[in-house]
Amino acid sequence: MDADELHALALSRPADALRIARDVLAGTPSDAEAAAAHHAAGLVHRDFGDIREAVAELRAAYRSIRRTADRDREAEILATLGVALVMGGQTRRGLAVLDAVVPGQTGVLAGRLFIRRGWVLGAVFARFPEALADFERAVDALSGTGDLVWEARAFGMRAMALLAMGMIDPADDDYARSEELFAKAGQEVEYADARQARGAVALARGDLPAALQFLDDAQRIVEDLGVLEPDLYANKCLVLLAAGLTREALLEVNSALERSEQQGGSRARHAELLMCAGLAAHAAGAFELAERRDRDAMRLFERQQRPWWAAKAELALLETRFANGGRTAPLLRGGQRISAVLDELDRDLAAEAHLLTGRIALARKDSAEAVRHLSIAARARRGGLRTRGAGWLAQALLHQDGGRSRGMLGACRQGLSLIEIYVRTLGATELRALATAQGAELAAMALRYAVERGSGRQVLEWSERWRATVLAIPPVRPQADDGLVADLAALRDLTQRMVSSRDRGPGTSQQQRERQRLESAVRQRVLLTPGQFDERRERLRITELLEKLGDRTLVELVDLEDQLYAVIAAHGQVRLRPIGPTAVATHALSHALFALRRENARRGRHELKLDTIGARLESALLGDTLQHLGDGAVVVVPTGRLHAVPWSLLPSLRTRPTSVVPSAAAWVRAMRAEPPAVDRVVLVGGPHLSAGREEVRRLAELYPDAVVLADGSATADAVLEAIDGASLVHVAAHGTFRADSPLFSAIELDDGPLTVYDFERLKRAPHRMVLSSCSSALGGPSGADELVGLVSALVALGSAGVVASVVPVSDPATVPLMLRLHEQLRAGDGLAEALARTHDSADATSQSFIALGA
């Protein structure tokens, strides 16, 4: 095997190359053979992160090649040594080696050397125009030479510089060409690098699902090869953070950081991983850990003489200190200094630095300094996608500080519209919900202004502007994916076996690991669902809301800076009333839910006074708004943290039809919903319910034409087919709420759990649905004020109304309640009216169900 073949093997199958190199060196090689073997071993050690060993091997290669007449090979080895020195933190020395070896070279060799020096200039020193010039020379020198690997590298390196300079489409074209050439040459590791680089392009374009897909593809390849690629994990961390998947970002980057430390890897790449780990810790609220990592990364970058990276790490450090309550004069001076540094190095990052500095100045009441920096940051609102959000926030803060409320509200609208466009690029419900957090500050700023003015109408408008945003966008069904269907089926089968098995031996832990693997696979497939770009969100029109309310009263709760307010809309008027501390309401709710759980389980020796508990909850939630409720039905819009209120426990609402909705706009949409043309009722009975069979049997007598799935026929496929587009569905089954992963909340069927991921595959949700299941109304708070769970999925898919419970309920007590409920439904009542008529104040079970929607 000649030197070029061994060099290529070191980058495609490193373990094989290292074995061959050792075999060569164990014999009696010539100087040229020894140089090639040491060179290949140095490449493998470098890419595995063993920089000391790499430098030693490359110096040995240089000593061997010096004893030959092959000056071209000598230049190649010296250039590789220069790159290794840079990766080991000796950046100036490594660049000096490259600067010495490049001049005077021509042809293919010159192209290879330009690539190496350009990489150091761009990836390490962030001198992108100089790097681009080297890469242009490399592309010219290598194109059409038949050297596929180096031609692919030239295109990939040029793409790196183009992307860094904001030229996204040309960068993607170059990366695609590089990927194609690496695949043709069989270079697996570098093919994976090109794949993950395309993920960075997709992120820059704002296409998170595509970015995740590219990165997942690349990760599978490098993990199969046993190679640590720090760039991949750093990029994946940034993509996951952009998606709001903080926990996943922490796990990925911490794992990569640990492996880098164990392997003694590239100090240059180790510093970049440290900075990403700091960003992930900051996002998770672990500010002390974030500060340590930011500081360590900054010091490494400074020692490595990498000013752009050092400035980026320092900005992250200052942002962490500000988020952790720092408002000191030294912090302001730090912001001023780093803003000036980044003005010279990176305009996009400079906008973020000026925004931070302006906010620190605002917090310190230094209006003149705040205006100076916020004005600079606000210019970015007309820049690229990366900076526009920061620009609109800066503009809003600037107008707010100057008392220009109209300008502030306009900036908030523009910033929220920008984020909403981004949310639409995401297909997965989870990603959409998490992305709304980016608009929370803008929405709160406008809402605070409306509350201070005491305008109920304005508070309602701004509350609705960023409430239940995900539900206002038509859902994107997961792509037709046999793999997703198969993984969901395997997960049901495994869960069923785990439930039925009483074995607590070694097999149990193995089953748990397999369940985690399957859940991860399902979640990952759905996260890759692309969004739809041409949808328009319909805004709430308050005049239409007041018209549709008729004799009803709408109460929308608003949580602003831990204070609860109520907006009351009724009889053509909108009022605003302060309630009190949010903490009082959440504490009263926790007490009420505990009481219902205990009474339903019949575990307490003494009967709790539910009337007293309900009255306390009513006071904490509604305050003196009761005088504005009138006598008619009530529509309640709770906050995310208060979504699980048992409203019939409140004395004033006990016998009053009460509908619960995630937003006023969602209620209006539900009121417009047309029932299916064909009246089709579906009754589903799950296993292991003490009274489930009786419940379904009795209901079947009320609905003789109903589709009945029970006693073994209630399988996932059969249930999904039957309920798709049905007019009314009743499910009597055990329900589980997964606080750790709400989209795996499920109802138990004969062949295992039917999760939210399964429901999202429906073409059309049932028009109305009764979930006679434990805790089926619960959702997981996410993003700004979103809920992720079974009921929210049904509402998003188009269900007009759902009856569900907020706590575990008693099976036997549920049967008579459900029979009474359906008798009222058959008499023509809506869900809220039917539930109110079946209420029994002495029965905890009836107080555990709520009616959601219209």
Image: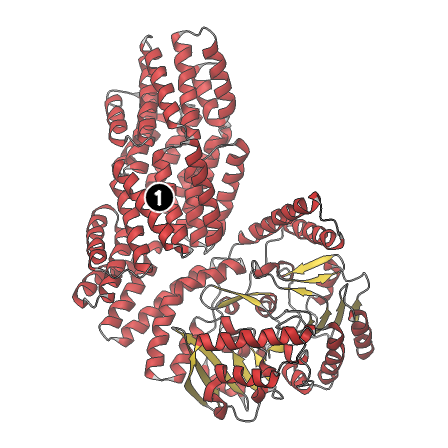
Count of labels shown? Answer: 1
Q: Residues within 10 Å of mark 1 (few under 14, many from 20)?
A: many
Specify the amino acid type for callout 1: Leu
User: Which corner quadrant of the image does residue 443 belong to?
Assistant: bottom left
Dividing the picture into quadrants, the one containing residue 780 is bottom right
Find residue 100 and report its horizontal and vertical position in percent.
23, 22
Tell me what residue is drawn at x 40 percent, y 66 percent: 440
- Residue visible at 28% across and 54% down? 318
Query: Measured from the top left, where is residue 323 in percent x and y?
Result: 33, 59
Compare residues 204 and 486 and report the one nearer the observer. Answer: 486
Whether 515 is drawn above or below 303: the answer is below
92 up-or-down from 126: above or below: above
Going by the picture, which residue comes out furthest to the front?
Answer: 605
Q: Nearer the viewer, residue 270 or 784?
A: 270
Q: Quadrant of the C terminus?
A: bottom right
Residue with the mark numbered 1? 163
Residue 749 appears in the picture as rendered: yes
